[in-house]
Every structure is written in structure tokens, then in C-alpha cells.
Amino acid sequence: MAVEIHTPQASTGAAPKIGMISLGCPKALVDSERILTQLRLEGYEVSPSYEGADVVVVNTCGFIDSAVAESFDAIGEAMRSNGKVIVTGCLGAKSGDVLERYPDVLAVSGPQAYESVVDAVHQHVPAPMNHDPFTSLVPPQGIKLTPRHYAYLKISEGCNHKCTFCIIPSMRGKLVSRPIGEVLDEAQRLVDSGVKELLVISQDTSAYGVDLKYKMAFWQGRPVKGNMLELCRQLGQLRAKDGSKAWVRLHYVYPYPHVDDVIPLMAEGLVVPYLDIPFQHASEKVLRAMKRPAYAENTLARIKLWRSICPELIIRSTFIVGFPGETEEDFQILLNFLDEAQLDRVGCFAYSPVEGATANELADPVPEDVKQERLARFMAKQAVISEARLKNRIGEEIDVLIDEVVEEGIVGRSKADAPEIDGQVFVDHRSTKDRLELKPGQVIRVRVIDSDEHDLWGEHLA
């Protein structure tokens, strides 16, 4: 995900201007939000173009080769268009690689190095003198780069796992959970500002609090234990000043046993019945080679249990095909898993070597043509499953969060759909009631009337 930054600006005369490009995952987007919030508080303005910026910050991604290439391209474009560039983010953790390609960048830092980025900006573009932060027009929830009605809530940094295909721990470090009171304070500010959907993100949401030994804290005068279950419960109980609540959606959930305890909260309506849970494969041999956590769990039995507790549960997952050592038998195990699991939303990638990943040293690499052939077979099978599951929703009445109101109608999402990665719900204006009053962030009731393998179509109910 590449984001060019445009934010509300105060008129402050000759205040220095910052350009920003944010690449990669939502976690990196939150880092960009934090950097921009601090700079805006100090009196910097945000430029919507390279030409108008005194310096450009490029927040990079470095997880896979294609992301590295995109990040280098973005740095190059910023250098050509402006020439004063500060590089941060995951690719910045490999500062030598960046400086070899672009020796004239002003500074390079790794992910979540907020202070380093701000210090570099100060060094090359000093902050305005005698700036009054009360004139910065920065809202209590900070600068957000998402639409006003949803926001990402990052609960931790880093990861304790050593998955052989991943280099995130080497770039972002081990798990560091935010104190639960700090997370809840931010969530409350977001809900008070009008956010209708909180997207909970981290490298490993299920491990939240383990590094703090699930330390108890007091929040709004009551004791709250710092673990995943209690965090979800408290987020689900938040209310805005007008009494409204936000959807709470969980991303990057690993299938630890205690995830079972969160499912009843979904059945109660405290948390959206949606799990983004990266299974990655179904062959125990491949999972062992990947060093995936919980690979020995009977995943199918747990999925059945979750759905028995919360029949509305939507499961999204991601998989890797063509991992070193994957045989046709392993791949067939994966296809059989898809048939049995009947997952709702699925993404899949052909394995790609990542510099620094230990999987590169594994024997029996899969030929590229075989990887691509397996990827095509995988996606074809899942497309049939997804289309059938969405077709079964025809006739249902669902809540839809409006993302856009366009000339043709409403574009929104149900509780089954996370922004950017899942499907959408389209509602023709001919069926809408009071369509001139509808706006992004509202939740309307819709009857599903049609579907395809990704999206739903519906009619607005009174």
C-alpha cells in the first residue's frame, strides 16, 4: 500500500513543509501518522507535492523483493523530484543497501525510529521559531492517514517468532507490547473523534502482553489485565460521547489456544466476528520447515469449534505455495484443507526468497514455473469457495459501513470486509432511502441481492 500524504494545514506563513510517502503495511502507516503528528505539533506543514516540500520522508517496506523494489523506486523518484530525502522504515534497517544505491540521501533509519526521523528533519530543515503548538490544528487523536471513519490501532511492535521465511524480527525486533492503558486511551480518543471502526494491528496480536507478563493496570479507575482477551473486551465496550460504538476488527492473529476465548466476545457483539489469521500452509512438514507457531494444532477442529460458538464468524487467511521442499503431496494437503476449512477470504503468494531469511538455505527449492502453476490452482479453487460462500449470503440482512457515496450509489463494507484487502458492498441509489443524507461513516441496513467471488450487491432497507 503506497500512500501520498495530504493532511489539513494551518496557514503559518513561511513554515517549512514536509513531503511524505508511506509504503507497505498498515503498521508502517501508523508509523507515518506518528511522525507527521509530531512534526505538525512543531509547526511544520505538509506538502502535497515534491516540488513544494523542503524535505521528503520516504517510509519504506522491505519484507519481500517486490516491496524492496517499490521502495527503491520511491526513493529514486523523490531524489529526482526533490533531492532532499530522508529514508526510514523496514528497508532503512539495511542502511548500507540504501546508501549504496542513493549515497546522497540525508539520513537513513529503521522502522519505528520516530525520534531519528524527527531529529533528521530538525537537522536539515529547522523547526519554526516561537511556534505555538495550540495553533497547529492537530486533533487529539493525532494526524490520521485513513478516512475519518476508520483507523488502525497498533498494540505492539516486533515479534518473538523465528519463521524461516520472514525477516521482520531482524528489522523490528522482539515483541514490545504497549501498556494496555495507553492503547485504550488512544482507542477512546479515536472513537470520540468519530472513528466507527478500529482495526487492531501488530506483528502478532495474539501475543499481546506476554512480554509484560500480562501486567495489570488501572484504566478509568478500574483494574484491567494486559492480555489479548481483556484488551478485546475493553475495546468492545468503548463508547463515544454520543453513546455510539465502533466496530473492533482483529488482524494478524496467530492461532494460539487462548484465541478460543475471544470467539465468545464476537458472538456477544463486542468484537466484529472476523479473524485475520495467517495459517500459511496445511502440510505439517511444510509448517515445521517454516517454524510456524502452533503448527501441530488441529486447525480444522478449531475452526469447527469457533463456528459453533459464533456461526457468523468470517475467517481470512494467507498462504504460501512453492515453499522449499513443498512436494505435490504437500500441495494437495493444502488444497484439501481449503475444501474442508471453507475459508471466506484468502490471499496467497508464491514463495519468494527474502534476503536474510533462513528459508533460503533449505534444500529442494521449487522451480518457478511449478510455483506459479500451484498458485494458479490454489486461487482457482479458492475462487469457487469464495463465490459459493458469498452466494449463500443472498437474502441476508446485514449492516454496511459506508465508505463512499458516489453518483451510482453507495460503496461500503460489511463486518466481513476489512478495508483495502477484502470485498465491498454496493448499493444502487435507486434503493436508498434519504440518499442525500447518507455519508461515509454511517452504518445502514442492507438486504443482499447479488454476489460474485469478491463482492456483494444489496438494497437499502428503511
Image (cartoon, grey):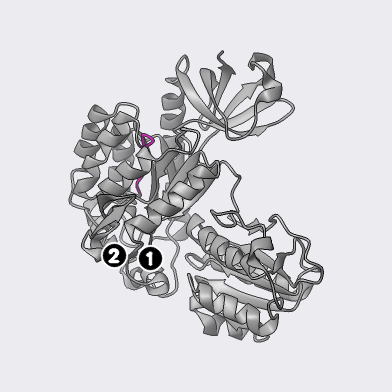
The N terminus is located in which quarter? bottom right
- Which residue matches tag 1? 166
- Image point 52% across, 72% down: which residue? 114
- Percent coordinates x, y for residue 417 in the rendering: 48, 36
Residue 66, placed above or below residue 391: below
Q: From the viewer's perspective, is the residue at label 2 or at label 1 nearer?
A: 2
Q: Sequence order check: which comes first, mark 2 or mark 1?
A: 2
- Image point 33% across, 40% down: which residue? 335
Identify the mark at residue 262; answer none if there is no mark.
none
Amino acid type assigned to the residue bearing label 1 in the image: Cys
Nearer-the-camera pick, 372 or 196: 196
Element type where label 2 sits in the image: loop
Horizontal arrangement in the rendering, residue 200 relative to residue 89 (left or right): left
Magenta-tinted stretch = 271-277
Q: Could one spot residue 444 in this view of the protein?
A: yes
Whether label 2 touches label 1, CB < 8 Å? yes
Q: Could one spot residue 348 in this view of the protein?
A: no
Nearer-the-camera pick, 430 or 281: 430
Nearer-the-camera pick, 89 or 233: 233
Element type where label 1 sits in the image: loop
Crowding at dot 1, Cα within 10 Å, few <14 / some 14-19 / many 20+, comes out as many
- Percent coordinates x, y for residue 380 in the rendering: 46, 37
Q: CA distance from mark 2 to mark 1?
A: 9 Å
Residue 394, placed above or below residue 309: above
Nearer-the-camera pick, 338 or 179: 179
Horizontal arrangement in the rendering, residue 133 relative to residue 197 (left or right): right
Q: Quadrant of residue 107?
A: bottom right
- Percent coordinates x, y for residue 304 in the rendering: 23, 32
- Image point 33% across, 61% down: which residue? 179
Answer whether residue 237 is magenta in the image.
no
Identify the mark at residue 161; answer none if there is no mark.
2
